[in-house]
Amino acid sequence: MPGIESLTNPRTNLPNVFTDIDAREKDFVTRFGTSWQALQEVLGIARPIKKEAGTKLVSYTASISLESGDVDPGCVIPYSKTTVAESVHADLKLQKYAKAATIEDVDKYGAEVAVQKTDDAFLNELQVEVMEDFYTLLQDDTYAITSNEATWQMAVSMAIGRVKDKFKRMRKNVSAITVFVNTVDAYKYLGAANISIQSLFGIDYVQNFLGATTMILSSEIEEGKVIAIPADNMVLYYVDPSTEFAKLGLVYTTDGDTNLIGFHAQGNYGTAVGESFALKGMKLWYEFADGVAIITVDANPS
């Protein structure tokens, strides 16, 4: 048939209608990666670290007992006792997700709603899930620095001060502090203040607040709690979905040098649905479990 070559896709040898799926896959992973790059900048995370699936993540606690520096001439200089111990462990696992849009949905609502809008919701939930997991980790006070303060403002200030003091004692520099607070608590204070709140894919934050480089507002943080962590203490680990899975016949579209997520879309004629699959292995983590301050607001602090 004349001109048949112009109607095929060289990659798939299928009609060119499938190039729309290629573009959809690329758009999905690009938007996910761009959003996470922006969030990493807000949190102050320098760069993500690629890990293999099944890698065990470890946090440490560190302390030093400094010996006197007044040593007589010719005498042995005593060693200061430094202790570094493993504390929190977790697995970096691959997570698999799927969604489907039926031909009835497309016929009833149109492809813009049945496909694109559900893609948007899918992407948002995958992003939010990573942050919710991190909020749970942050609120574990097993190794955290804890105290009570009478007011919310003092809790923010002391949370920042305590993590700065901790890292100074560890002889580590602190370039920026991120504070996590409950949304309602923050608005109670901010209601009377002329402060600009910014938003990034559903995460509200304030920059340069009471000594914090960034303050994150989240309903995942318990009311009356303020959590501070140095940006240098946060790390984003990830598994590259484009690595070995093609050997199984599973080819996921990824984005750029830092492949945080894989995405694939296809039609299933047997069920008359459009299927979408996502693959990710991402975890926000902290290097030092005792480099986090959790301060509780208490009208009568001990």
Image (tube, grey):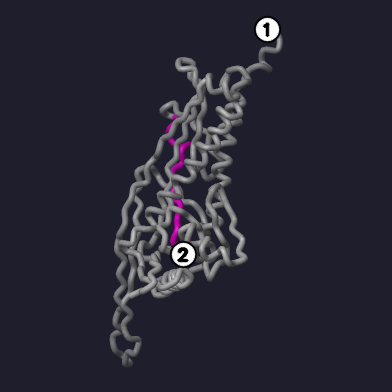
Task: Identify which amino acid the numbered label 1 is placed on.
Answer: Met
Which residue of the protein is positioned furthest toward the top in this rendering? 1
Return the mark for residue 21. none
Using the rendered view, name the quadrant where residue 299 is placed.
bottom left
Q: Nearer the viewer, mark 1 or mark 2?
A: 2
Return the mark for residue 230. 2
Left or right placement of residue 34 versus residue 138 in this view: right
Span of residues in magenta: 231-246
Q: Position of residue 19 (x, y in %)?
A: 61, 25
Q: Which residue occupies 37% across, 46% down? A: 92
Task: Identify the residue under disc 1.
Answer: 1
The mark nearer the N terminus, 1 or 2, is 1
Q: Residues within 10 Å of mark 2 (few under 14, many from 20)?
A: many
Q: Position of residue 210 (x, y in %)?
A: 53, 70
Please count the marks in the image.
2
Q: Which residue occupies 34% across, 58% down? A: 140
